[in-house]
Image: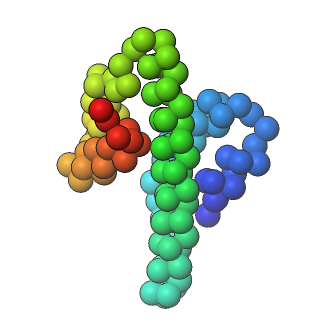
Amino acid sequence: MTNVVDAASSATTSPAAEASESATPATSAPTIASIDEGRQLIDDIDIRIRALVATRKDLSAQVQALRAAAGGPRVEHGRENAIITAWADELGPRGAEIALAVLTLCRGNLP
């Protein structure tokens, strides 16, 4: 199983290129031989998800600051709706809930 966080940090391409290359999610899980093995893989995935969300949160703060400095709004509702739709299309209604939680976390404190 490829470690997304390690793979992205060791690549020599730009962050935007890395993001587009990893935009296609893996759709199959490895076959496991035991509950312990499955739990370890799940724990590893959870660590990577938290790291990716933390990176997303940092990037979102930078984008919000740049947009505000340019006189724009902190939040682009059209973009957020597109993100929620993409998550829902991929994962169903619960995917939309996850997207909304991630977006809310990454927005920071709104005035």
Q: Identify the residue at image location x=54%, y=37%.
A: 59
Which residue sits furthest left? 93
Q: Is residue 64 visible?
A: yes
User: What residue is drawn where x is 48% and y is 50%?
Assistant: 53
Position of the C terminus, as image quadrant, is top left
Residue visible at 63% across and 59% down in the picture: 3
Residue 99 visible in rendering = no
Task: Where is residue 36? Give x, y as percent.
Answer: 50, 87
Image position of 36 (left or right of 93): right
Hey, which residue is sitting farthest front in the picture?
A: 111
Q: Quadrant of the N terminus?
A: bottom right
Q: Is residue 79 above or below residue 51?
A: above
In the image, residue 62 sits, relative to residue 44, either above or below, namely above
Quadrant of res 99: top left
Residue 88, horizontal then vertical, whole percent: 27, 43
Measured as percent of width and height from the top left, residue 103 is found at 35, 41
Q: Residue furthest top?
A: 71
Camera-nearest residue between 33 and 62 = 62
88 shown above or below 30: above
Q: Is residue 10 left or right of residue 78?
A: right
The total of numbered circles placed on residues is: 0
Please state if 100 lies on the left or on the right of 49 as rendered.
left
Q: How is the image coloured?
A: rainbow
Residue for point 46% across, 19% down = 67
Looking at the image, which is closer to me, 13 or 90?
13
Q: Is residue 48 above or below residue 87?
A: below
